[in-house]
Each structure stands twice: as structure tokens, then as C-alpha cells.
Image (cartoon, rainbow, N blue to C red):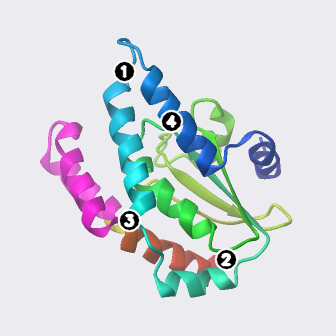
């Protein structure tokens, strides 16, 4: 798969954030006892809904998006991903600051060839956000979490034997710093690459 094909596929088959959120809610209500992501889906849908209500883009973010035009932002993710639930509503709100930015979401597991273009240390970590210009040239990509969180997670991985022990700390970090750190990373990318 080429990156040009990825953009075309995202525009034709990708979901808007509203459609992604609606589908996540439907999946949450339709989950069965064998759904391994059942508890996570409910929590993640609540997180996404909360961020929609609480995130207000900063003036710096608004100014940075004023110069962004004619871009397609593709997000590769899954609704069971805790990081995505914390990040995707913010990215969607940022993208909506420009009338000429189109945001489309592809499911990681449904589009493995797209995901394999953006592995993180050889893994299919999500979410990944990729910005393309009008000629479908990649401007930048970002993810699977803010730079400040990556540093913390690397530290916690050495401290905790069980990865799940660090998740409460990570989600507490998102609650306190997520919006500002996502903005910081995106503003820097826009100023340097986009």
C-alpha cells in the first residue's frame, strides 16, 4: 500500500469522528459476554464523550490552525484503545478549527496494510495521526501518545512488571495534562512540518 492509496482509502471508507463515536456507542450497547473489550469500550466511550464536553482549544492552537489548509488527517485507531479515547476527541476538535481539514478514521485491525506503514518500535500501537497535503504528500505523523506521556510510559515499563498496573497512572496523567500536551505536540508539528 502506498501513502497515496492510504489517503484515498481513508476518504472513501474512513469514518468521521461523529460516525466513529456513534459506532463506539452502538458497540458498547451490543457487547456480549464474550467481548474481550466490553469493559474498556464503555469506559472509552465515556472518556470520549467527556473530552468532547471539556476540551476547549487554546488561542495558540487556534492561531496555529489558521494557516492550515487543504489537508487530510487520517487517524488509525480502535475504539477499545484507552489512549485513543483520551486523544481522538482532542484531535477531532483541533482538525475542526480549519474548514479545509478533513479528518477520517480507519480501524487498525480492518486496515492492517495501512497500520503497517506506521509501526511504533515494530508494534501496531494506536492512535496514529497522519497529515497529508492536497497532493497526498505526507506532512507529518504523530502518535501513539503525546511525547511527554511516551517518556512516562517508558519509565513506568521499567518500574511495573505488569503493564496494566501503569494504566491508572497514565489515565490520571491524561486527565491532568492530556489536552495541553496533545496541543503542544500538534502546534510544534504544524510550525515545523505543516
Task: Based on the picture, tell me whether residue 165 belongs to the magenta stretch.
Answer: yes
- Near mark 2 (Cα within 10 A), the count class, few <14, some 14-19 or many ≥20, is many
Q: Position of residue 150 (x, y in %)?
A: 34, 60
Q: Position of residue 80 (x, y in %)?
A: 43, 35
> Which residue shows up at 58% across the image and 87% down it?
63
In front: mark 2 or mark 4? 4
> Which residue shows up at 82% across the image and 52% down it?
4
Task: Check disc 3 and report the residue beneath it.
Answer: 54
Label whose residue precedes the other's in the sequence (2 or 4): 4
**Alpha carbons under labels 4 and 1: distance apart:** 15 Å
Q: Position of residue 156 (x, y in %)?
A: 19, 52
Q: Answer yes or no: do the residues labelled 4 and 3 have beta carbons within 8 Å? A: no
* Left or right: 2, with 105 as reference point: right
- Near mark 4 (Cα within 10 A), the count class, few <14, some 14-19 or many ≥20, is many
Quarter residue 113 falls in: top right
- Magenta stretch bounds: 149-178
> Which residue shows up at 66% across the image and 34% down it?
111
SS label for mark 4? helix
Task: Check disc 2 and report the residue beneath it.
Answer: 194
Task: Check disc 4 and report the residue beneath it.
Answer: 24
Label whose residue precedes the other's in the sequence (3 or 1): 1
Q: Answer yes or no: do the residues labelled 3 and 1 have beta carbons within 8 Å? A: no
Q: Nearer the viewer, residue 49 or 101?
A: 49
Amino acid at each position: 500500500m502506498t501513502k497515496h492509496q492510504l489517503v484515498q482509502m481513508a476518504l472513501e471508507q474512513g469514518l468521521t469522528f461523529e460516525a466513529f463515536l456513534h459506532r463506539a456507542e452502538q458497540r458498547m450497547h451490543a457487547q456480549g459476554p464474550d467481548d474481550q473489550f466490553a469493559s474498556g469500550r464503555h469506559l472509552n466511550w465515556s472518556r470520549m464523550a467527556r473530552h468532547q464536553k471539556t476540551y476547549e482549544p487554546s488561542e495558540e492552537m487556534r492561531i496555529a490552525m489558521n494557516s492550515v489548509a487543504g489537508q487530510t488527517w487520517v487517524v488509525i485507531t480502535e475504539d477499545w484503545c484507552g489512549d485513543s479515547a483520551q486523544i481522538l476527541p482532542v484531535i477531532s476538535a483541533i482538525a475542526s478549527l480549519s474548514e479545509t481539514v478533513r479528518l477520517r478514521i480507519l480501524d487498525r485491525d480492518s486496515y492492517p496494510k495501512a497500520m503497517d506503514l506506521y509501526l511504533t518500535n515494530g508494534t501496531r500501537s494506536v492512535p496514529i495521526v497522519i497529515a497529508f497535503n492536497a497532493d497526498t504528500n505526507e506532512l507529518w505523523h504523530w502518535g501513539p501518545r503525546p511525547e511527554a506521556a511516551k517518556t512516562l510510559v517508558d519509565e513506568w515499563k521499567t518500574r511495573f512488571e505488569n503493564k496494566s498496573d501503569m494504566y491508572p497512572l497514565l489515565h490520571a496523567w491524561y486527565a491532568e495534562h492530556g489536552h495541553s500536551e496533545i496541543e503542544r505536540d500538534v502546534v510544534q508539528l504544524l510550525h515545523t512540518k505543516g
